Image: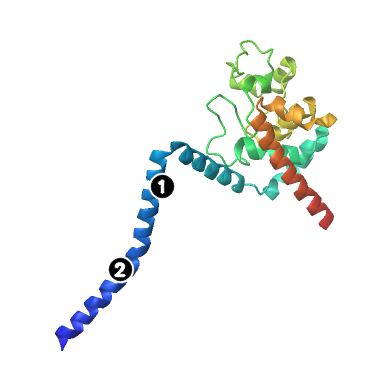
Amino acid sequence: MKKRQSNRISIKMKVILIILLIPVAVTLFTLTAIIWTGLKNPELIRKSANALLDMQEKQSGTTIPEDYIPIYKEAAEAYGIPWTLLAAHHRIETRFSTMDSLLSPAGAEGHMQFMPCTFVGWSYPGCGGLGKGKIPKHDKTNPEVIKKYGGYGVDANGDGIADPFDLEDAMHSAAKYLAKSGAADGDIEKAIFKYNHSEKYVQDVLGFFDEFEAYRIETETAH
């Protein structure tokens, strides 16, 4: 009697194991097919991977942090540009300041990724090339030095320091730069291109700008 019961349990377990292994087998088959297709057509794999990355890029981090909106509005109003343009740049530059480091390999710094020479002024001694320069920290954040050399750094909170790693200072500095580059006159595309000389960059920022403008209109209408 015990032996027969044991056999029944064993058969039942086999059935369960077979059911559990079916998804694994399907997954392995699919992966094998993808790899085989990739070996025969690497371009297809590359395009698929790029499409997946683009989709993830568009879906991640598109919601504007509510706490940042008053800062965008204050900076944008001070320089006569749309606050949604600042939000779009902020999203593209540092994913709303959620990137692990606010310092790029090229040397761009802070929440809005300013090159030091743009922040302090290109006439600062030693500035050239991409604009990383060799600027001491005490000069890099000194409003008087920035004023002297024609930089875009702004001490927005009045603490005596213009700091690209301070959110308010960074937003006012970016607003000042974008306004000067054409955004204050309504030439949004020109201003974006001036910020980063890349057509792809322009399209990426414009994409979020349009999305955030729709959000702004919707919320203003609702209120």
Could you classify mark 1 by the number of other residues whose Cα lies within 10 Å: few (under 14), some (14-19), or many (20 or more)?
some
Q: Quadrant of residue 143?
A: top right
Q: Quadrant of the C terminus?
A: bottom right
Depth check: give the residue in front, 18 or 6: 18
Q: Nearer the viewer, mark 1 or mark 2?
A: 1
Q: Is residue 163 visible?
A: no
Distance between the Cα atoms at labels 1 and 2? Answer: 24 Å
- Whether the residues at callouts 1 and 2 have beta carbons within 8 Å, the answer is no
Q: Is residue 139 visible?
A: yes
Q: Is residue 111 above or below residue 66?
A: above
Q: Is residue 150 above or below residue 58?
A: above
The residue to which callout 1 is attached is 34
7 sits left or right of 157 in the view = left
Where residue 88 sits in the image (x, y, percent)? 69, 39
Identify the mark at residue 188; answer none if there is no mark. none
Of the residues shown, which amino acid type is indicated by label 2? Ile
Q: Is residue 220 above or below residue 178?
A: below
Which residue is most to the bottom?
A: 1
The residue to which callout 2 is attached is 18
Of the residues shown, which amino acid type is indicated by label 1? Ile
Q: Quadrant of residue 169?
A: top right
